[in-house]
Amino acid sequence: MMTKKDLHLLEQKGLSEASVKEQIERFVSGFKPLEVLRPATPGDGILQLTPENLKKSTETYKKTKEEGLRLSKFVPASGAATRMFKDLYQYLEEPVPLKGLPFEHPIVRFCEQLPRFAFFPLLVDKLREHNLNNVHVRKSRAVAIISALLSEEGLNYGFLPKGLVHFHAYPDALRTAMEEHLVEGSLFALGSDGLVNIHFTISPEHEELFKKQLYEHGPEIENQFESGLNVTFSFQKPHTDTLAVAPDNSPFRDEKGQLLFRPGGHGALIENLNEQDSEIIFIKNIDNVVPLHLLPTTIDYKMALGGLLLDLRQAVFGYLQALEAGGGPALIETISKFIRERFFAELPQSFIQSSHEAQAAYLQHYLNRPMRVCGMVRNEGEPGGGPFWIREDSGQESLQILESSQIDTKDPHQAAQLQAATHFNPVDLVASVYDYKGKKFDLSRFTDPETGFISNKTYNGKDLKALELPGLWNGAMANWLTLFVEVPIETFNPVKTVNDLLRPQHQPE
C-alpha cells in the first residue's frame, strides 16, 4: 500500500505508481530465459578483417569524416572507483604486517611496486615525512600509504570516480582516465569543424570534480593535438531508478520507513544516448584506455569500425529507398543475400513462405533500425558478456551481446553454448542512430524490456532484491542491426583493480 509520502517520492523521481507496481510484478514473474542458439564465431556472426579490409574501411571513415560527418564519443563514467580499491579497503579493516603475507598478496605487490603507479608522486607529496622511495619504509607504512590514497585528507581516491583516478605517467604530466579519453578522441574523432565531441555520463556529486579536471588539463591536450574539445556531461535519469523489494517481494523500506530505490543499471543510459545528436557515436568504457605510445592499434581499429558502419549504412539506406520505390522479386532476393552475407543472418521460414508484399514489408522493418558495429576480442578469461546468436519470438535469428546471467546455465544445451564461446565483449562499438530519411531514431523503441536482471543484495545487513534494466549494449540495444568484428586484444586494457595499472599496457614507454 502506497502512502502519501511514497507517492510524493515517486513524483520527485518522475515515476508513476503503475510503473512501480509493474516492477514489483516483475520481481514475482522474473525474466524469461533467452533461447541461445550458439555463440557467434568467426564466419558465423563475427567478421575478421584482412589487412586490405582494414585499410579500405579506415579510408572510408577518414573520407566521410572530412566531408562533415557529425560524430562523437560516448563514455559511461558514473561509477565510483571503490571496487577498484576493494583489496586496499579490506586490508585497512584488518591490517597485518606485510612480512607475514605471501609475495603474491595484492597488498604486498601494491606496496613493493608503488613507484610504478602514476599517482606515486602525489602520494610522496602527501607523505613527505616518510621516504617512500625505500621499499622497506613502504612495507612498514602500508596503512598510512593506503589511507593517504583513499581518504578525503589524502588523494580522496575512495570517493573519486574511476575517470578521475590517475592512470598513466608521462615525463611532463600525469593523466587520468578521463584525460586519456580526450587524447584518444583527438586522434580519431576530430571533426571537420576542428572539434572533438565527447560526452561523459557521470554522477551529480562528481560533476564539479570532472569540470575542474577538464578546465585545468583540457587546454594542454587541445594544444598538443591541435583540436578543440567539446566536452559535455549528463546524469542517469532519476525515473530510471528501480524499487528494491524484500525477499517476499514486498517493497523494501529503509530505517526511516522510506521506499528504497536503486540505480537501474547502465542500461538506463540508453536515455542519455538518445539525447545525443551526432550521426555516428563511438561508445567505450571509462577504464579501457592506454598511454599514448600504445594507441596506434586502437586508433586504427576505431576508424576501421567506423568505416565498416558507414559502408553498411550507405548500403542499407540505398536498399530502404529502393524498397520504398517498390522493387520486384529481384530486389527482395538481392537484399536477402545482403543480409546473409553482411550480417550473417538467415531470414526465418515464415519470411520465405510469405507473399512478395509481405517480404518487402518485413525487409523494410528489418533494415530500418539503429545500427551498431561492435568490436569483439578473443576470450582470454576476462569476466563479462560475449556475442551470441539467439532466436527471437518471431523466429528470426539475431546477434546479441549477452551476460552469463542471461543464459540458463541449468539447461545443459544453453550451458554448452556459453562454454563454447570464443569471444568477449570489450565494449568497443560505434552506432548509427539516424534513419535513411535523416530523422533521428527514438532509441527507446528498440530495447527489449524482457532482458533485465534480478540480483540479491543487502542494505544495512538486510537482504533485498534489486532490479536492473537491460544493459546498454545488451537488452537496451537488442533490436538494433548488429555486426560483430574481431579486434586485437591490444585494444582491450581495462582497469578493474588498482594493481591492473601495473600491467605493461599501463606503464610508460
Image: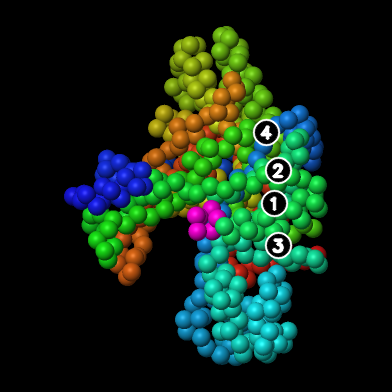
- Label 2 close to label 1 by CB (< 8 Å): yes
Q: Position of residue 347 (x, y in %)?
A: 51, 26
Quarter the C terminus occupies: bottom right
Q: Amino acid at mark 2?
A: Val
Q: Residue at x 62, y 71 (%)?
A: 499
State the SS at label 3: strand
Which residue is disc 3 drawn over?
175
Which residue is disc 2 drawn over?
196
Q: Earlier in the sequence, mark 2 or mark 3?
A: 3
Q: Amino acid at mark 4?
A: Arg
Q: Which residues are magenta?
A: 202-207
Q: Earlier in the sequence, mark 4 or mark 2?
A: 4
Report how far apart the C-alphas of labels 4 and 2 lie in the structure: 10 Å
Q: Amino acid at mark 3?
A: Arg
Checking the image for residue 90, the label placed there is none
Q: Alpha-carbon neighbours of circle 2 within 10 Å: few (<14), some, or many (≥20)?
A: many
- Splitting the image into 4 quarters, where does residue 230 fall? top right
Q: Is residue 466 above or below residue 338?
A: below
Q: Alpha-carbon neighbours of circle 3 within 10 Å: few (<14), some, or many (≥20)?
A: many
Q: Position of residue 407 (x, y in %)?
A: 43, 49
Q: Earlier in the sequence, mark 1 or mark 3?
A: 3
State the SS at label 2: strand
- Label 1 close to label 3 by CB (< 8 Å): no
Checking the image for residue 70, the label placed there is 4
Q: In this rendering, would 151 be left or right of 180?
A: left
Q: Is residue 255 above or below residue 392?
A: below
Q: Position of residue 501 (x, y in %)?
A: 66, 67
Q: Earlier in the sequence, mark 4 or mark 1?
A: 4
Report how far apart the C-alphas of labels 1 and 3 lie in the structure: 10 Å
Q: Compare residues 263 and 347 and report the one nearer the observer.
A: 263
Q: In this rendering, would 224 be left or right of 277?
A: right
Q: Is residue 290 above or below residue 64?
A: below
